[in-house]
Image (spheres, coloured by chain):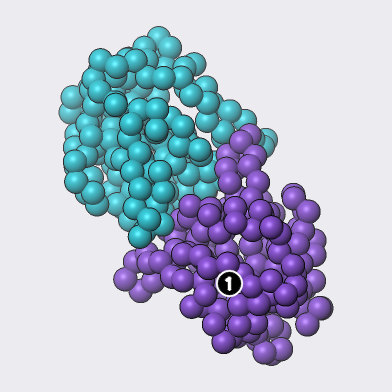
Amino acid sequence: MLSEGMTLPDATFPVMGEDGPGTIRLGERLKGRRVVIFALPGAFTPTCDSAHMPSFVRTADAFRAKGVDEILCLSVNDPHVMRYWGRLTGALEAGITLLADAGAEFTRAVGMEFSNPERGMLNRSKRYAMLVEDGVVKVLHLEQATGICEISGGEAMLAVV
Amino acid sequence: MTISVGDTLPEATLARMGDNGPETVSLHALLKGRKVVVFALPGAYTGPCTTAHIPSFIRTADAFRAKGIEDIFCIAVNDPFVLKSWGESTGATAAGISLLGDADGSFTRGLSMDFTAPQLGLIGRSNRYALVVENGVVTKAHIDEPGVCNISTGESLLADL
């Protein structure tokens, strides 16, 4: 289960770039760096669309000004959906890296999965944000209720970085 | 199993976006007493699905209705949030095509139509096919080879009616 002090497991994420498919190795992005990772239930879902992603698009420059090397957004979606959503929300333009946890391996490995079959959501990620330094979770903001985005939002994380 | 003319499609619980948000629906309830087209594809926002497969049914939707088809259903292993957005951005929803999410992939696996391409981030997705289904029984079956969008297009199925 994801917690402060934990070393994140390595993972590989598929990505759709301008030149076709590629991969992102999480370990390479974390090693010796200070990054913020936020995770959400799904591209195009209401709270993620209207609140969570915009909060990091708004604060991306402020995070960089505080010495954060990279901001990564993780969701159990495929990289095709993530790429389109990243364009639509302005995330790509804001320099946010999208991690498509297509098979939910990372989300399961850190114990963050949930399912809500009535809404067509299977093995998705709970909503959280974390500050990670050299692969170790320094701050974890796990949203407790569903359908809201408060502690896991960009401003709440920015305040403690 | 695969899909052959004369088969009764298995029952499935599919997810779609209703007026009040996501909801589940029985496939058999949608098929009962009606003559419909059912086509399936690997995923919203993937290349050939967006540029070729769904446009072929948008182009032919009126012609299908003129030939007595009462509904056109598009099934993909996606959640209803992604499908809603994709249906709007492609024009499928405006063309009267109903998007149904096989969110857990169980319907697709039951038909042995599933494939996995981890490098593309596509896990347990559907190969392409297009069917005419009358009162739940398959009367035309156009099954494409994996990776191909040829005989499962709108034009190809329409020519067979």
Which chain has been coloured cyan in this picture? Answer: A
Picture coordinates of residue B150 (x, y %)? 80, 61
Element under disc 1:
strand
Residue B116 placement, left or right of B84: right
**Residue at image x 78%, y 54%?**
B145
Can you say which quadrant of the picture contains the N terminus of chain A?
A: top left
Q: Which residue of the protein is positioned furthest toward the top in this rendering? A: A32
**Residue at image x 35%, y 60%?**
A118
Which quarter of the figure has residue B71? bottom right
**Residue at image x 28%, y 48%?**
A51
Picture coordinates of residue B122 (x, y %)? 59, 43
In the image, B102 versus A20, the foreground residue is B102
Can you say which quadrant of the picture contains the C terminus of chain A?
A: top left
The residue carrying mark 1 is B73
**Residue at image x 75%, y 72%?**
B5
Crowding around mark 1 (Cα neighbors within 10 Å: few <14, some 14 to 19, many 20+) is many
| Amino acid type of the residue that numbered disc 1 sits on in the rendered structure | Phe
Is residue B17 visible in the rendered image? The answer is no
Picture coordinates of residue B79 (x, y %)? 46, 56
Is residue A15 visible in the rendered image? The answer is yes
The colour with which the image depicts chain B is: purple
Position of residue A29 relative to residue B130, above or below, is: above
